[in-house]
């Protein structure tokens, strides 16, 4: 026999679906159920990142028998230990991120949680001691009203909220937007932009940095540098999507 509480939840959920049919957050078409979040058409266009990819930075390979280091990682090193992205930066996922960052559409956060559950990449990470969203400078935070990396972290890791810390890593430089800058310009723009506020809490810890988009990696690289300088034992990176070409 179904417990009364569970039966009531089913009834309420079904009633809400009738009164307010669930709609795809991207195209606004009706979805099959409230727990689907994206319609079939939009979901089919997503490009989940799967093997093969660079075992260090997560760069996508067109074809390979197994994961291996890409040319960049063989020639130079990153401050972080491993980086992974859930999706390639394409129309659907880019649109969802844009709505979150620039239109304040935080109602779509459950979609990101659901999408992260459809990927196997979270299994690539060991359990971190802390999850650190890439911080915004206080002026940009005041203008936007929220840090998209922080709300994404809370959505994707609902069971690890005590690990999510926004007070350990801060952005001390109000750098210009990275949009349109080359890799060299991005690295120069972000040099010494981040500082660890509580080094004693970071020392010897395993850290997971979370951000929305990995483009050149300049932002997470500078975050990782600051954390490693403060004594972090390991720094991994998770981003929603990766905006670079697929390499063969």
Image (cartoon, helix red, strand yellow):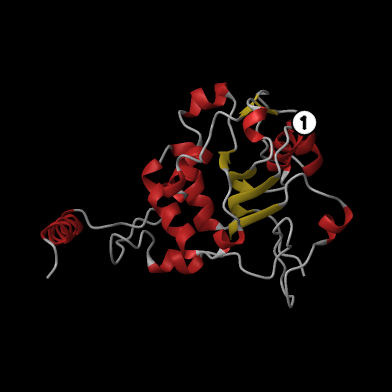
Locate the C terminus and report the quarter of the image it occupies. Answer: bottom right
Label 1, on which residue? 191
* Secondary structure of residue under mark 1: loop
Q: Is residue 66 above or below residue 135?
A: below
Between residue 16 and residue 221, name the one nearer to us: 221
Q: Residue at x 73, y 51 (%)?
A: 81
Q: Residue at x 76, y 34 (%)?
A: 229
Where residue 145 sits: x, y (%)? 45, 28
The extreme right residue here reads 75
Residue 10 in the image: above or below residue 234: below
Query: Which residue is drawn at the image coordinates 54% and 32% (left, top)?
Result: 166
Closest to the observer: 161 or 170?
161
| Residue 88 visible in image | no
> On the picture, is 58 further left or further right than 36?
right
Q: Is residue 240 above or below residue 68?
A: above
x and y percent of residue 214 in the render? Answer: 65, 49
Regarding residue 80, the answer to whether it shows in the image is yes
Looking at the figure, which quarter contains the N terminus?
Answer: bottom left
Depth check, front residue: 204 or 182: 204
Residue 183 placement (x, y as % from top left):
78, 43
Dot 1 crowding, Cα within 10 Å, few <14, some 14–19, many 20+: some
Q: Is residue 177 left or right of residue 162?
A: right
Residue found at x 70% / y 64%? 60
**How many numbered markers are drawn?**
1
Question: Looking at the picture, does residue 176 appear above or below residue 125?
Answer: above
Task: Report which quarter residue 221 is drawn in.
Answer: top right
Task: State the image coordinates of residue 106 (x, y, percent, origin top left).
Answer: 40, 41
């Amino acid at each position: 026999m179904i417990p009364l509480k569970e039966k009531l939840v089913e009834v309420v959920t079904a009633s809400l679906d009738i009164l307010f049919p669930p709609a795809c957050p991207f195209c606004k078409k009706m979805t099959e159920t409230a727990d689907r979040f994206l319609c079939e058409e939009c979901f089919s266009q997503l490009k989940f990142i799967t093997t093969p990819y660079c075992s260090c930075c997560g760069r996508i390979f067109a074809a390979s028998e197994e994961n291996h280091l890409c040319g960049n990682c063989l020639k130079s090193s990153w401050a972080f230990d491993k980086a992974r992205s859930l999706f390639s930066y394409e129309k659907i996922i880019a649109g969802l991120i844009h709505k979150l960052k620039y239109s304040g559409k935080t109602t779509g956060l459950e979609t990101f949680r659901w999408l992260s559950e459809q990927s196997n990449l979270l299994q690539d990470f060991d359990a971190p001691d802390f999850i650190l969203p890439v911080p915004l400078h206080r002026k940009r935070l005041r203008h936007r009203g929220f840090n998209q990396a922080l709300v994404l972290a809370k959505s994707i890791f609902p069971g690890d909220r005590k690990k999510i810390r926004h007070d350990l890593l801060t952005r001390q430089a109000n750098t210009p937007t990275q949009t349109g800058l080359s890799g060299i310009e991005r690295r120069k723009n972000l040099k010494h932009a981040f500082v660890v506020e509580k080094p004693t809490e970071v020392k010897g810890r395993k850290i997971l940095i979370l951000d929305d988009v990995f483009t050149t990696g300049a932002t997470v690289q500078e975050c990782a540098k600051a954390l490693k300088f403060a004594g972090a034992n390991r720094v991994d990176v998770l981003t929603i999507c990766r905006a670079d070409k697929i390499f063969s």
